[in-house]
Structure formats: C-alpha cells, structure tokens
Amino acid sequence: MLLLAFDTATVSVSVALHDGSTVLAEAHGEGSMAHGEQLAPAIARVLAEAGRTPGDLTDVAVGVGPGPYTGLRVGVVTALTLGHTLGLKTHGVCSLDALGFAARNELNLEREFIAAIDARRKEVYWSRFDAAGRRTSAPAVDRPDAVAAFGLPVVGRGGSIHSDKLDWIEGPLDPMARDLAELVVSGDVEVLPLEPLYLRRPDAVPQVPVVVP
C-alpha cells in the first residue's frame, strides 16, 4: 500500500504519505483562501521527500468535512481526479474523525469529549466521541452555546476560538493528514463517499436571472 492522504476542511492544508506501516512524509500549510494554491505543491513535496511518484500510489484518502465550501471542494475534486486518472482506491473520511483520533492519542482524556472545527459565522462544526476516540454522533453545526450545554470537554480550533463559552482543552487544533491516513490503514473508521459534508448552503450561489415581463 502507498496511501496519499490530505485534508482541506479547515484553514490548514495537510498532506501525508503512508506505506501501510508508517508515515513516510508530510507537509502542512495554512491560509483559509489558498487551498487550491497549496494542495498540489504539498502533494508534490511529500512524494519527492519519500522518493516516490504518483504512479507508485495505490490509495488516496481525503477529509470530506464538515467544512467551508471552497476548501472541501478543492480536496474532494483532487481526490476524485487522482482516483480516476491513476486508478486508485479512494477513501472519504469525516475530518472530525481525524481530529478525534489525534485527541485520543495525544491527550488520553479517558472520557467522552467533543471535537470542534471552526465553522465561522460564530458557529462550530462538531461531533461527540467516546473515551476510545470513536465518533458517537453525526457531524453538526451549531453556535457554541448549544455545544456547551452538553457539559463536555472540547478539543480543536472550534473550541479554542470559543474558549470563553466552551470547556476547551489545549491539544490538536485541526484535522491532520497523518491521522486520517492512520485511520484508513487501521480500518477502524467509517469510509464515506467522496462527497463534501457542507452541512449548510455555500456563501456563493449562482444568481437566478430576473425575467422582466
């Protein structure tokens, strides 16, 4: 196996290359409006660092959100294109699953918790996780006050930004491709179609022409 994994659901662009045993190389960038410019060079960097070519890949995995429209579209379209042109096995993964996986490994919470991604508009994308780091609720988008009502610790950038309302625990902020890859390799994750989890309408929508009688 040679798995290329990436996530563009947040302000971070994260790419990792995994051979089924370990992460061979990874790259990260940040910029909420620059996913399209960052992803392809980051993929090229990790392949070059590992001494591999696109033709060596067997699988591609992408975080399908939830997240903003533009970032998710960049990641999902790239994964679909690679899968089609190179004949790769494709894996869609909820980005919150990667964040919850990192929190379990890094923080050893030993209790239920919430992973939260910044959704802008003073809201967060979130899901509940059990002590083993398994997601126990469908991804949702809500205001911090609604999430705070569960009385659970919160990990992720969504918790950090709204730490005045949420019981934020310092730790991983964004979904990382290395964690996404580890989940896919382990087989202990729900594999989703390569379709973005927007959870709400995009900011930009086609204008409907006005017909004047």
Image (tube, rainbow, N blue to C red):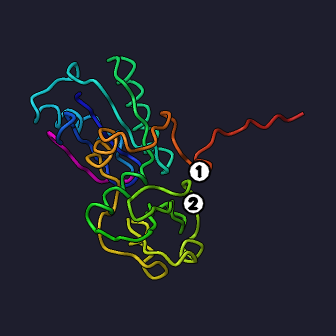
Residue toward you, 93 or 6: 93
Report helix, strand or loop for mark 1. Answer: loop
Residue 121: name its quadrant: bottom right
Above or below: residue 72 compared with residue 114: above
Describe residue 138's horizontal placement relative to residue 157 as left or right.
right
Q: Secondary structure at mark 2?
A: strand
Residue type (three-letter) at the residue carrying disc 1: Leu
The span picked out in magenta is 23-32
Query: Is disc 1 surrounded by few (<14), some (14 to 19) or many (20+) residues within 10 Å?
Result: some
Tell me if mark 2 has few (under 14), some (14-19) or many (20+) residues whose alpha carbon lies within 10 angstroms of its own. Answer: many
Name the residue type under label 2: Val
Query: To which quarter of the image does residue 1 belong?
Result: top left
Q: In the image as oriented, which residue stretches furthest toward the right?
A: 213
The label number, if any, that marks residue 141 in the structure image: 2
Q: Position of residue 20 (x, y in %)?
A: 22, 35
Going by the image, does 16 lie left or right of 122?
A: left
Query: How far across and down, in percent of the image, does residue 51 sit?
Result: 9, 29
Q: CA distance from mark 1 to mark 2?
A: 7 Å
